[in-house]
Image (cartoon, helix red, strand yellow):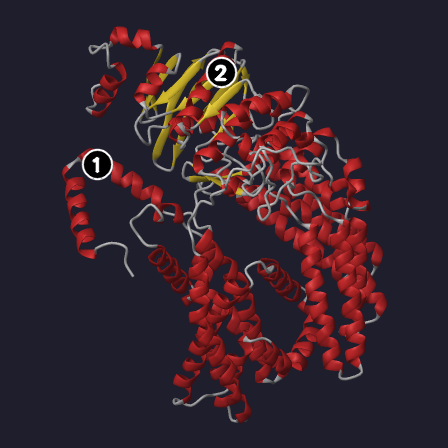
Amino acid sequence: MKLHSPGFERTLRQQVKQAVRRSPELKREFRQAKGSRRHYNLLQVLRPFYGVVLALGIWATVQATGHMVAGLAVINLWLLTLLCAQVPALLTRFYAAPELHTLILLPLSRAQIFRWQLQKHFRQSFYALLDLVIAFGALAYLNGFAAWQWPATLLVAVLAWVLLLALIAFCAARFPRRPFQMVFHGLIVMGLVFFIGRGWLGAAAITALDHGAPALNLILPMGWAVSLFQLLTLEHAWWVALLLLPVAAVIGTLKHSLRRLLADFEYQEPVWNEASDVVPAAAPNNGPETSADQPVRLGLTAIAEIIQIRAFLAAPRWPQNGWLEQKLWRWLNQRERALSEFVFPDGIVLTAVWLSIFRNLFITGMAALALGFISPTFKSGALALGLFVTFCQALAQTINQGRAFQPMRCSGVNTPMYAGFGVGFRELSRLLFKYSIIQAPVVLAYTLVAGVAVALLTDFTAATGLMVGLKSGGLLLACRFILVTLAFSTGTNDTAKIRFRSLALVFLLVTFGIIFIGFGVACLFIPNLWVAGIFWVLALLDAWLFHWVYQWFYHSGRFDLMSLPQ
Amino acid sequence: MRIELRGVLKGYRSVRALDHVSLQIEPGQIVSLLGPNGAGKTTLIRCLAGIAAPDKGAVYFDDQEFTREQMELRHRLHFLPDFPFLFWEQSVLRNLSIVLRLFEADGAGAENRVLELLRDFDLLPLALRPVNSLSRGQAYKAGLVALLAADREVWLLDEPFASGMDPQGIDAFKRHARAAAGRGRTIIYSTQLLDVAERFSDRVCVIHKGEIRAFDTLDKLRELAQDKNNVLEEMFRNLREGRQ
């Protein structure tokens, strides 16, 4: 699909080139504009190589387990990660992409804009196909496939890719509000934890993956297409062919999912009828707070009264949400309280979330205990799933940055919200640190319990689990310095220009980052608690230095608090 | 607050958005920034707001150099871009309360100020609605009401007259801005509308290719112009033809 005439574009391009060649001034401007158009996104440059990383992971897994199914499970988990990343990406492309503002001004129907955006999504997803081709290629090589088996391998890769696309569309259409992003980040962090701690966790993780691989490939829908690869191997598991049925059924939903997404793809300003100007019998209990779903509908007199009695300026009600919120509110000074409303405009919820995390952990434990009577694999699976879910919840809660760093598009650039209101680096960082520190006891309690659960899962002693849990909790809290710094950095163009300062900044931050990982790993794996404690203090100090160094560069005012949209 | 730019240079890759700009703005003035697209108007406003960092030179407020550490200086100015910084899922009133508290302007009398402004800008019936349910012009007015209610010493506005505001809103803004300038507030805004700049500014600042080509009162500029009735139009014609 094209939104323009290629012939017209060709002619226009030729004429522009001719005009530029004729005028020295235009030539100069053209060179300048050409220079400023170049953007390099490291993640995009490296994207084609992700497949190679996946293939290496598969190779290592198959070598360690001797089972191809374990390799297929790795592909399956990779597809789950892609699914969790792609569902929010697809929704953003349809409903929040910056180019939509321009597209709606063009004489195009919404169906055409929808197809245009969908086309871009499909183009982007070719990388997933590339990953799959490389991954299945690696498995085919490991199995010593004959020439006729290679085209069939390619077919399985394409089928898995189409299934992934169908699942992305299905999830976007049916479950747009599910926390895909959170699961994505959880999977990435878990992957990094397993990679960094492979010396300690590697063998146990590989064993767990090997045991759980057949079940995983059956439970996760992406695994249905991936499992078809088994039809090509010497141990023909013909029952696997039955999986073609659910695969076809899911792919069959693609059309319907797209139709559903198109039906919701509406650009309309909602029209609200004026509320009659009647004074309600009682003043609204919820004050001025409204939600997007249920806006308060009051007449002019009632609204004026809310303003006049200063209800809209009343102190926020989140400190009454629970014990942790109360403690945090008391700890914040006047300025930080005002900032907390800006950073967390929906209020702060701590106690309820942590209660839910511990409740989920308890349910997981009980379910694992019950399933243990049926099969040890089920027990491990339930425990691993519960730990993963609660870990995602705990991570999201501990490192929550609020809304201050949200990029706002204005005059063609993205400016973080805090910069628009002149909120300072120190004050904002301090608030976010306090937000994390107040949660430290519950974070440590969680990591201690989770550490014991992981120890049970991996045949370590409970004492080892407790110690690792304590250290992990401490390191998670130390990470906050780095994460807040990175949140500041994301909204700026600090590394856009190749200058001595930018290079020095990158060098220092990478160095401190590597040192942090080094101290963190040492803290985790040194059995002596006192020595490990010293390494934790060093890691904390390093993270603080990371933050302090960036703060110095930030205050020296050599970069902008805005970034060009990618 | 007295504003001064001393030799401010700001470049984006090979483009010089501001080329050694020096400027002094006295308090209590309404200054319009004029210039063709890409002249450097928005960059100048961003430098004043502390969002863009000058490559060379510095910005001074009351003879104090403005750096990112000096938050007390930053709190004395309010920046309103073409798309206002708002929490779109929150109500207009909630956004106002957040901004007022952030600028510590929520003291006694804030409620009357907010009520008056909401009435003036026809936003009172919409005060409890989420901003994302409003039209672009209404959302801009919400940002503008926040700026007027916070009432900082310096107002920085990027293209306020191309924001989709209705004539009633534009009229209310001009009225409040005039009154604020009378109280010593400095209002700096960018625009492409020459007739607006002609009628609604104490001083006009014309920028072209990052350089200040003119910065004076309209009367002074009129004295220099050949076409006395269309001073700014003539100036733009000259800029386009490379004569000035």
Task: Estimate the spatial distance between the alpha carbons at disc 1 and disc 2, rounded to whole Å.
Answer: 38 Å
Q: Which residue is mark 2?
A: B186
Q: Residue at x 53, y 83 (%)?
A: A227
Closest to the camera, between mark 1 and mark 2, is 2
Q: Which residue is mark 1?
A: A26
Q: How many neighbours does mark 2 have within 10 angstroms: few (below 14), some (14-19), or many (20 or more)?
A: many
Disc 1 is placed on an element classified as helix
Q: Position of residue A538 (x, y in %)?
A: 74, 48
Q: Position of residue A57 (x, y in %)?
A: 56, 72
Disc 2 is placed on an element classified as strand
Please state which of residues A185 and B82 is positioned toward the viewer in this rendering.
B82
Q: Residue at x 78, y 62 (%)?
A: A359
Residue type indicated by callout 1: Leu
> Which chain does the numbered disc 1 sit on?
A
Please state which of residues A322 and B217 is positioned toward the viewer in this rendering.
A322
> Which chain does the numbered disc 2 sit on?
B
Q: How many neighbours does mark 1 have within 10 angstroms: few (below 14), some (14-19), or many (20 or more)?
A: some
